[in-house]
Amino acid sequence: MVEQKKNDRDAIGALLDLSIDVQQDADDAAEELRAMGVDVDGFLMRVRERRARELDEERTAWLRVARAGLGTESARASSKYAEMNHAQLVAEFRRRPQQQASSFFHKLEEIKDEDLRTLLVDLDDLEDGEEGAP
């Protein structure tokens, strides 16, 4: 493993040395590196694989953030209203002076308790001016 890292460093150093020579094109540089014992194709393959992993990580970074946020939102929803039963949750919801939300939820008896808790937390955020805050 140590020998492989040393070879990688030597290959990178050789590439940097060759990059100084502006008269040399990529094919000539690769040929010269091969003559020096550098595995150019292997090096380029590792670079491409690493870049592909980095691009994949960048592409899915939003997913990690979203997953992390799911746990905190669930904890917030259950903390304030956790001890309330369904009737208490419905009463709390009806106590609020919201217009639009009540039109969507006219059959409150059919809504799950956890959904009511989340709705109440969202309404709290709206009242506090923290829409979208974690």
Image: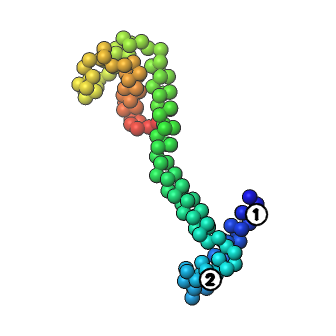
Q: Which mark is residue 54?
A: none
Residue 93 drawn at (x, y percent) = 34, 19
Q: Residue 5, located in which quarter of the rendered image?
A: bottom right
Colouring of the image: rainbow
Give, as a three-letter code, the residue at label 2.
Ile
Instruction: Please indicate, yes or no, whether residue 74 appears anywhere in the rendered image.
Output: yes
Image position, residue 75 (x, y; %): 50, 27
Residue placed at 45% from the left, 25% from the top? Answer: 77
- Whether residue 87 sits left or right of residue 53 in the image: it is left
Quadrant housing residue 100: top left
Disc 2 target residue: 20
Q: Is residue 40 left or right of residue 121?
A: right
Task: Indicate the position of residue 120 as horizontal and vertical percent values.
Answer: 38, 24
Secondary structure under the numbered disc 2 in the rendered image: helix
Quadrant of the drawing holding the N terminus: bottom right
- Among all residues in the image, which is located at the extreme bottom? 23
Amino acid under label 1? Answer: Glu
How many marks overall?
2
- Asked if residue 78 is positioned above or below residue 14 in the image, the reply reads above
Q: What residue is rendered at 25% in x and 26% in y?
A: 104
Residue at the (61%, 67%) spot, across then down = 43
Question: How many neighbours does mark 1 have within 10 angstroms: few (below 14), some (14-19), or many (20 or more)?
Answer: few
Residue 20: x and y in percent read: 62, 83
Which residue has dot 1 on it?
3
Any part of residue 19 in sight:
no
Residue depth check, mark 1 versus mark 2: number of the one nearer the observer: 1
Q: Residues within 10 Å of mark 2 (few under 14, many from 20)?
A: few
Which one is in front, 40 or 22? 40
Instruction: Report helix, strand or loop for mark 1.
Output: helix
C-beta proximity under 8 Å, tags 1 and 2: no
Residue lying at 37% horizontally and 26% vertically, measured from the top left: 119
Return the residue nearer the eye: 16 or 4: 4
